Amino acid sequence: MGAVDDDAEIIAEFLVESHENLDQLDRDLVELEQHPGSRELLSSIFRTIHTIKGTSGFLAFNRLEALTHVGENLLSRLRDGEMEMTPPVAQSLLTMVDTVRALLESVEETGRDEAPAVDVESVVAQLKDVLEGSADAGGASVTGEPETTPPSPSPEAEVAAAPVVEAPVVELAETSAPVAETPPTAPPLDKLDDRDHEQHDDEPMKRGVVDSSVRVDVDLLDSLVQLVGELVLTRNQVLQRTESQDDVELVRAAQRLDLVASELQEGIMKTRMQPIGQVWSKMPRIVRDLAVQLGRDVDLQMEGHDTELDRSLLEALKGPLTHLVRNALDHGIEPPDVRVAAGKAAQGRLLLRSFHESGQVVVEISDDGKGIDPDTILRVAIERGVVTRDQAARMEPREVVNLIFQPGFSTATEVTNVSGRGVGMDVVRTNIERIGGTVDMQSQVGQGTTCRVRIPLTLAIIPALVIGEGEETYAIPQANLVELVRLEAEDLARSVEEVAGAPLLRLRGHLLPLVSMAEVLGRERPEAEALTVVVVQADDVRFGICVDEVHDTQEIVVKPIGRQLKAMPTYAGATIMGDGRVALILDVPGIAHSRAVAQHVAQRTSGDATQAVTGEDSTQLLVLEVGGGRRAALPLREVSRLEEFSVDRIERSGSAEAVQYRDGILPLVRLAPAIGLAETVREDDQVSVVVHETDSTLVGIVIDRVLDVVEAALVCSEVGRRTGVLGSAVIQERVTDLVDLDAVVALSGVGA
Amino acid sequence: MGTQSQYCTFWVDGLFFGVAVSSVQEVLRYQQLTAVPSAPEAIRGLINLRGQIVTAVDLRCRLGLPARADDALPMNVIVRSRGEVVSLLVDDIGDVITVDTSPSSGLELEPAPANVPSVIQDVVNGVLALPDSILLVLDADRAADVSAVLETTTGGTP
C-alpha cells in the first residue's frame, strides 16, 4: 500500500472490513429466515450495521450513514422483540444490505458515496414504512432495488433479472469468492468473474481493494517463515560443502539454490511486512479526541506511512506508540494560552516520522511543547528513590531525561485519565525492549521533546556478528554493535587501565567499561598480549566485550532456547551455523545488567536496591590518601562528586577557603588538619576535592588523592578514634581511618 | 487397552528406566553438543535437531550419578515436555516394552521404595517390578526441569 493520503488508507481499511462484514451479514440474514426468532443472529447483524454506520459517519459518507441508521433502527426493534420478523421485513433488510454494498462499491470507485444510480432514498422510505408497520409496501419496489447497483451494467442485469430472493444469494457468492476460500461453484459466478476481469483490463490501476489482497492465516505465515529459515540454514551448509567440489554442475546448482533461497527468504519476510501507516491511521482520531479533552490545539503531521515492518512487531508497537503520543499531548504540548504567553504559535505541532536506518526501523515522535526539565526530573527521581544523590550528580542531562523510563516515575503533578499514573513510561520501555528495540528521549526545555524508538525490521532473521571464544562461537546481534577495536602491545598498555579491578578502555576521550567474554561465561579472564574489543550498546549503556576472535557478520535465524536456559541473562537465543552446529546468541542488555556495567539501570528496580545489592553489612567506601601517605575512607554514598580545582581558584575569606562552583560557593575543608594530620606540602597546582552534599549545601573536602573504591564489610575498631575520625578499619589489608564526615563538615562552618 | 502401557527403556549408570512412549518423540545416537557456559551443570549443551534447538539434559548429572567415562558417548532420548522438546542423555537404549498392568497380571505401578535416593524418587512416577528387572518409570517433565535456581548477579529483574 503506497497510499500517502490518510483518508485513502482509512477508507481502504473500511472497505475491506465492510465487505467482510457484509458477507457475514448475508449469511446471517439468510440464516435468520430459517430461524426468525434468533436474538443472537439479530444482535450480530445489528452490530455489523452499527459498525458500518459509525465509520461512515466518521468518514462523512452521509448517504451510507442515513441508510444504515434506519436499518439499525429496524434491527434494534427486531432484536428487542418489538417487531416480528416477517418475509417483508427480511426482504427490506436484504435490500438495505444490497444498497449498502452498492454504496460501498461507489466509495471504492470514486472515494465518495454519491453515486446517483444508487437509490438510497426509496430504500430508506421503504425501511421507514416497515418500521411504521406498513410493511406491505414491500412488493415491487423491493424487487427493484438490487438492480440499482451501478458499477457494471451488463452482467448485473442478468443477476437482477433473477428472482428477487435469489439476488442476494448470488451476490454473496460473488463477493465472498475473492476474500474467502469458498470454491467458485455457483454458475453465475463465472460471469461475475468475467466482469471482474473485464474491469481489470479496462482499468488496470483500479483493482478493487478487496480483490487485490488475500487473507492468510498468521500461523501459516509463521510456519513458512520457519521453513524458510530452515532452507537458509540448509543452503548455508550446502554452500559450505560445495566450495571444495570440482563438479561444476553441482557448484552451479548450489549457486542457483543460493539465489533462489535468498529471494524466497526475502519474499516470505515481505509477506509479513506491513506499513506502519496501519498504526498511524488511528492517530488522527486519538490526537483529535485528546486535544479536545485536554484543551490543546494540535497539528498532527505524519511522515513515512509506508515504512514497513514485521507484523508481529507492528502489533507490539501499537500500545507504546499510542502511549507516547498521549504523553506528548498531555505533558508536552501546552494549552494555547500558555503557548502564546511563551511566544509560540497557539497551535502545537506533533510530528510522527518513521524511516529505515541501518537495518532498523526508527519511529520518532516529536512535539514542540514545553520539553522536559532535567532538574525537575532529577528532583523527583531522588525523591522517589529512583536514583541516589551521588548517582544523580554524575549523570549527563541526556541520561537524566531518560530517567522517565524508570519504574515508578511520573512527574505529572496531578493524575489525569490520560497519563500520569507513573506506570506508563517504564511499560513503554519494557514493551519496546521485549521486541528487541530501544527508546531514547531527547528534550530541550521550552523547545520540545523527541522520542526516538528503534526497532528491528524483523525478529526472525537478524544480522549478527559471529565471534569466537575458546572453542565455541557466539553471535552478537548487529543492532547492539557499535564498533570493533583491536588493541596490541603498546596500545593495550596505554589505553586499558584498571580501577579497583574493573578494566576500563580509554576510547577517544571516554572511559568504556570492559567485560571479558571469558568472565561472562564463568571462566578465568585470560592474560593476553592483544585485545579484541566488541563495543556494544545496550539501553543507554555502552561497554566493550573482550573476545578471542571476531569471525564475520551473518544473517542468522533466531531460535528460542529451552525453559531451563531462559532465566540466564547472558543468552537471548540460539542459532544454527553453516556447519550445522548450534551457536548461542548473546543478550547484550542482559550481560550489561549481570556484569553491573549498567549500574543505575540495575538499581532502578527499587529505591532500596542500592542496599539490596550491596548487602546489609557491606558498604561502598571511597578510599583516599591524605596527610602524606595516610589512608582514610568515607562512605561512597556521601560523595556527590569528585572534582579537581586549580589552586588559584581557591579564594579566601578570613581563614575559610572556598571556590566558585556551579553558580555558587563551595566552602572547602582540608581533611588532613580536620582529622589531626599534618597538611601535605603540595607542589602541583591542582587540589582533589570530594564534594559532599548535606541537606541543602555543598561542602568540598580537600584530599591528596583518591585511591580506590572498595566494597567492604565494615568492621570498625575504636583504634585511632579522635576528632574527625570514627575509628579505623582494615581495608585492603591496610589500616584506614574512617572519616567522621559530620565533624569534618562542621569545621567548614556550614553545619551538618 | 487401558491396562497396557508401553515404555521406551534405557539405562543410566546401570539403572533401568522407562518413559511412556507417548511422550517420546524419537531416539538418536550421539549428537554434537554446543556447551552453554554457566548454565546449570546438568545441561550438557544444545543440539541441532533438524533445525530445532534442543536442550540436552544429562540424566546422570541430573540424578546425581557418577559422570560417564570420557570415551562413552551418550544417546539422546528426545521427549516432549511442557510444549518443548528436550533431549535426555542416557547411557544405552533398551527395547520398547509393553507392560500389562491389568489386575490379573499382578503387576502395578508402585511408589518408588523409600531407600531409593530422593533425587531419583523426585523424577519417577513409580517402579514396575518386572520379572527380570525393576523398571523405574520416569516422569519426563520433572526430569527435564533442571531445578537449579539461577542466580542473577545483580538481583535485578528489570
Image (tube, rainbow, N blue to C red):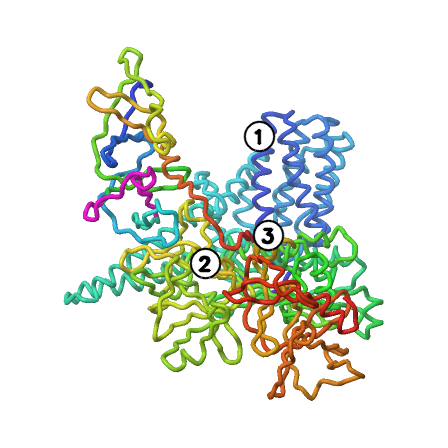
Q: Is residue A479 above or below residue B29?
A: below
Few, some or many residues within 10 Å of mark 3 (<14, 14–19, 20+): few
Callouts 1 and 3 close, C-beta under 8 Å = no
Evaluate whether label 3 is on the same chain as label 2: yes
Q: Which residue is mark 3?
A: A616
Q: Chain of mark 3?
A: A
What span is in magenta?
B54-73
Query: Left or right: B21 with respect to B82?
Result: left
Q: Residue at x 27, y 28 (%)?
A: B7
Marks 2 and 1, the one that precedes in the sequence: 1
Query: Left or right: A30 with respect to A566?
Result: right
Q: Is residue A723 above or below residue B100?
A: below
* In front of the other: A145 or B104: B104
Which amino acid type corresponds to the residue marked 1 in the rendered image? Glu
Q: Quadrant of the C terminus of chain A?
A: bottom right
Evaluate whether label 1 is on the same chain as label 3: yes
Residue A612 is labelled as: none
Which amino acid type corresponds to the residue marked 3 in the rendered image? Glu
Few, some or many residues within 10 Å of mark 2 (<14, 14–19, 20+): many
Q: Position of residue A283 (x, y in %)?
A: 66, 58
